[in-house]
Amino acid sequence: MFTSSIYIFLTFLGSLFLLIFTLVYLYYLYRKEREFEDKKAQIYQKSQEILEQSYLQAKDIIEEATKKARETLSGSQLLKEDIEKGLADSLKITLDKNIKEIEQISGKYKKSYENLFEGMKDEYLSRTKQNMDNIIKKEGTELDEFTQVVERKTVDTQKNIEAKISEELQKVHLDIEAYKKEQTAKIDQSLSKIILKISSEILPKTLRPEDHEKIILQALDQAKKDGLFN
Amino acid sequence: MNNEQINSNKKDRYLDILSSIKTDTDAVQFSSSLNKLAFSLYETRESINQKISRFLSNEQKDKIILYCKEHGINIDDIISFQKFISELDAAVKNLPKITLFLAYEPRDESVSIISDWFILNLKQKILLNIEVDKKIVGGAVIVYKGIYKNYSLKNKLDRMLSENKLNFNYLQTGEVNE
């Protein structure tokens, strides 16, 4: 009895000890879990802060860079305008100068050409006059003969042309006549066909028995005249 | 008198009896009726008069009886009447024939008019063999004793057109000249 009671007591103590140990271990696990969660939250918060800071810094840098770029651009535009203006001015000056020079040169050339042409013209006129005088003197007698030949030739040519035209006209007339005949024949042929077709289609419908009889008797009379019944 | 003249005289004699026979079809039917009549002559059930009525039309019967009376043929004498019938049949079979191509199906009146033309103009009976050919438009194509003659309107038109008898000057003048 006593032994049994001791055994039960020892078992109770052992169980109690086991229970306490288990509870302590669970609590330890719980603490560890909390610490881990806290650390995780801290790390996340830290990373967020870093990201935000980085964003702000980047924004500042971009703004600064944009500002700088704008300043640079406006500076270069002014520079460009200055350069363009300067270039235009210098071009204008150069151009004016060149025009003036060209005008001077062309004036000179013009004058010398005018002189040259005047001289050539005078010389040509004088030579032509001389030649004409020579021709008149030398061939004065042959001129009448030449005129006659020309007149004769002209008349001959005119006659030839007239004959040729007449011949061509006749040809054209003949062609037209032949064409007309051909076309008329074609029309005749077509009309013949049409008339025959119409006759073949319409006459049988329009002829009454009396008409048929009359035509048949005419045919018989004709056959008798032709000696068919002899 | 040669055989042809004798036959011709006989045909003329029978002209009145044969007046109702106008076409070769009529002739074939009439000939068949005469043959039947000839075969029936020796039957005793009917009189000859009744037998004639059985096989021929009233008009034909009257004409035959009249003819027999006029020519002294006794219809009750079987032998003489039979001889008459066979002569009549031979006359029918010997009738000349003519083939006519017409553009229309002729009515009975037309057939009579054409048949009468031959009697009036040729003084003889000619059997008509009528064929219908609408393509000929009008008139007639005649075949007689092996000779062919085209008197059709179609032929006439063809000839006129081919010989340029139709002048198409109306294209310019508005008139048609033939």
Image (spheres, grey):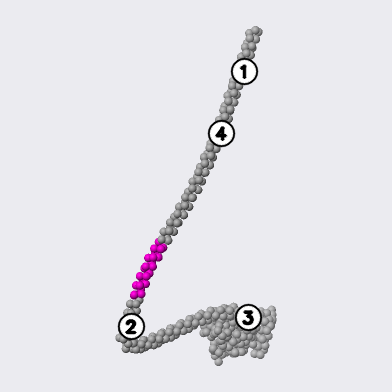
Residue that numbered label 3 is attached to: A206
Looking at marks 1 and 2 on the same chain, the residue that comes earlier in the sequence is marked by 1
What is the magenta range? A98-120
Q: Which chain carries label 1?
A: A
Q: Which residue has dot 2 on it?
A: A132
CA separation in Å, label 1 and label 2? 156 Å
Could you say which disc has been placed on residue A49 in the image?
Answer: 4
Q: Observer-nearest residue: A204 or A56?
A: A56
Q: Quadrant of residue B176?
A: bottom right
A136 vs A9, left or right, is left
| Amino acid tagged 3 | Thr
Asked if the stretch drawn in magenta spans residue A117, the answer is yes
Quarter of image, res B99:
bottom right
In the rendering, which numbered label is found on residue A19? 1
Give coordinates of residue B123: x percent, y percent. Answer: 60, 90
Residue A141 shown left or right of residue A158 in the figure: left
CA separation in Å, label 4 and label 3: 118 Å
Image height check: is A86 above or below B138? above
The numbered mark, 4 or 3, whose residue comes first in the sequence reads 4
Q: Which amino acid does label 4 sit on?
A: Glu
Q: Which amino acid does label 2 sit on?
A: Met
Q: Which comes before the other along the chain, label 4 or label 1?
A: 1
Q: Mark 3 lies on which chain?
A: A
Element on which disc 4 rests = helix
For the residues carrying marks 3 and 2, which lies nearer the camera in this image? 2
Q: Which of B14 and A45 is in front in this view?
A: A45
Which of discs 4 and 2 lies nearer the camera? The answer is: 2
Q: In which quarter of the image is the N terminus of chain A?
A: top right
Q: Give the SS element for disc 3.
A: helix
Q: Do the residues labelled 1 and 2 touch (CB within 8 Å)?
A: no
